Structures are given as structure tokens and as C-alpha cells.
Amino acid sequence: MKKKIYLIEDDNDILSKTPKTKFLEILEVIDKDVSSEILDDIITNYACMEHIIKEKIYEDKINEYLKNYYATNKDDIDDIKKSLYMEFVGNIIFKLPQ
């Protein structure tokens, strides 16, 4: 299986801001309708993923499974998180009125 390469940003970039910090700053200043739509999209995706996991794992074991999975794959998951924050920023910019 080919390994995905995620966009990785150095936490010590020129502006000294992480992708998470940039995302949260933008989320604070944009229109509430746009931020609500972005957060709803994120929750929808999370709910879909949880539903998929429920097909293989008992519902009361999901949090434990996720915690163990994160501990085992921390570096990869952290890289994916950074890429997702940057993707979300792109989604916000795309949804802003022109």
C-alpha cells in the first residue's frame, strides 16, 4: 500500500503559528454562518467515521479504541491533523463571500 504524504508545516514557521492556531484565529473572525457550516461539516465527518467504527467495535469501546490507536500512530495522526487544519482553512476561504 502506498503511504500518503501529508502537507507538513513546521511549527516554527515565519509567523510562529501552527495550522491549528491559524484555523482557530480564522474561525473566530469569520461570519457565524460560515463557521457554523464548517463545524457542522467536521461533526458530520466525525459521525460518519464513528458509524463505520461501530460496525467493527462495540459502541462503549470506541473511545478506548481511538485512544489506543492514537497512541500507536501518534506521529502519523499528528501529521494528518495539521493537514486537516490547513484543509479546513481552505474550505473557509472557499465559502467566504466574494
Image: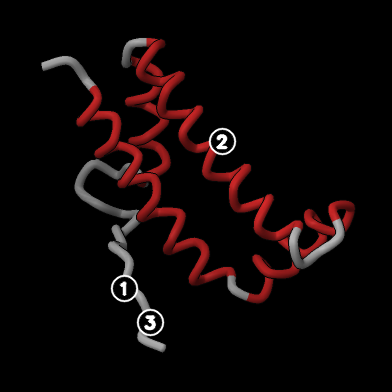
Colouring: secondary structure
The residue where tag 1 is placed is: 5
Secondary structure of the residue carrying numbered label 3? loop
**How far apart are labels 2 and 3 at the CA level?**
26 Å
Vertical position of residue 61 compared to residue 96: above or below: below
Secondary structure of the residue carrying numbered label 1? loop
Q: Residue furthest top?
A: 32
Q: Amino acid at mark 3?
A: Lys
Q: Amino acid at mark 2?
A: Ile
* Position in image of residue 58 (x %, y %): 86, 59
Of circles 2 and 1, which is in front? 2
The residue where tag 2 is placed is: 43
> Viewed as shown, does residue 85 lie left or right of 53?
left
Q: Residue furthest bottom?
A: 1
Q: Residue furthest left?
A: 98
Vertical position of residue 11 compared to residue 90: above or below: below
**How far apart are labels 1 and 3 at the CA level?**
6 Å
Q: Residue at x 40, y 20 (%)?
A: 35
Q: Residue at x 48, y 28 (%)?
A: 39
Tally of marks: 3
Q: Quadrant of the N terminus?
A: bottom left
Judge whether residue 67 can be spotted in this image: no
* Position in image of residue 9 (x %, y %): 29, 58
* Position in image of residue 28 (x %, y %): 40, 18
**How far apart are labels 2 and 1 at the CA level?**
24 Å
